[in-house]
Image (cartoon, helix red, strand yellow):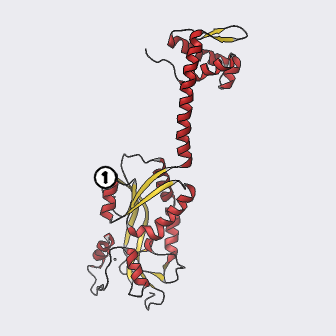
Amino acid sequence: MAINFDLNDLLAFRAVAEISNFRKAAESVHISQPAFSRRIDKLEQALGVRLLDRSTRRVNLTAVGRDFARHVQRLMDDLDNTLLGIRGVAASRMGEVTIACVPSTVYYFLSQVIRRYHEVHPKVRVKVFDASANDVLSAVARNEADFGLNFIGAQEADIEFKLLLEDRFVAACRRDHPLAKSSGNRLLLDQALANVAERPQSIYEAQHVTTQLGLVEAGLGVAAVPSLAMPAADHPLLVSVALTDPVITRRIGLIRHKGRSLSPSAQQLYDFLAEMRSARKRSAKARVAP
């Protein structure tokens, strides 16, 4: 048998079965009495049975109607419980989000974003996969991460790249250094310095920017690092000095797999990051000394 009725028709029948009055039942589901009568007629015609005996003052269920009313009530109870469960998950924002990112975005930027996100959605578990730019791209492409924060991916056919900011490289040094005047970032630096006659020679090498900053804090030299990786201007030891010859920048963006929908929790964090780009641009400019 084809189902020629819908949920609204069942809700109308449940209302009249409980109230036994067409006018009051129509008011309870917020429709006019003629529209309410049409819903009941539609339901009876679809089922091919009479569910109600109607008089001018009262409505009574037929024997079939009483049995059907019990089934409808159980169906509505199950539906209500299901919807309440779904709403409960959405309200509490329970879930898990995996974000892949290059390490230089984590320490002073992403960590602060996640802290603020946690204040709004304390029950969401956030997993951070910090890795090289290529590994971050692969994690997103293979759906091992919900989305990523990276400086490559804009040219990939299956990846959507949403620009967050232009991140400028700066010289990181201690405040007491005489100058208080590298990672996938290494390739950018090598390319920029390829034609520099007096190219500076490195003494220490490290894989991650945070390690480089630790070496700088220890007084072992200066390092060219992305401004995004630098602490705020009030840091007691480290200071940023703008690099001008050459100027080196990278485009940091959110990457996600095209055509893949994010979970509600992941979408919330994705939107949270996207909304913070303007504020971060202003903050980054303020941290770079002239």
Name the residue: 34% across, 61% down: 136
Residue furthest bottom as drawn: 178
Q: Is residue 42 visible?
A: no
Label count reads 1
In the image, 256 versus 244, the foreground residue is 256
Percent across and percent down for residue 7 are: 54, 24
Q: Is residue 33 above or below residue 210?
A: above
Residue 40 vertical placement versus 211 (above, below): above
Q: Is residue 242 above or below residue 3?
A: below
Q: Is residue 269 left or right of residue 184?
A: right
Residue depicted at 60% across the width and 19% down the height:
13
Badge 1 is on which residue?
142
Q: Position of residue 152 (x, y in %)?
A: 33, 62
Please say if 8 is above or below 283: above
Q: Residue 156's spot in the image, x, y percent?
A: 30, 55
Which class describes the residues within 10 Å of circle 1: few (<14), some (14-19), or many (20+)?
Answer: few
From the top left corner, tell me how far across and down residue 33 is, in percent: 67, 18
Q: Is residue 30 left or right of residue 237?
A: right
10, 37: nearer the viewer: 10
Residue 67 found in image quarter: top right
Residue placed at 53% from the left, 63% from the top? 115
Q: Which structural element holds mark 1?
A: loop
Nearest the eye: 275 or 129: 129
The N terminus lies in which quarter of the figure? top left
Say which amino acid is labelled 1. Answer: Arg
Q: Residue 50 lies in what quarter of the image?
A: top right
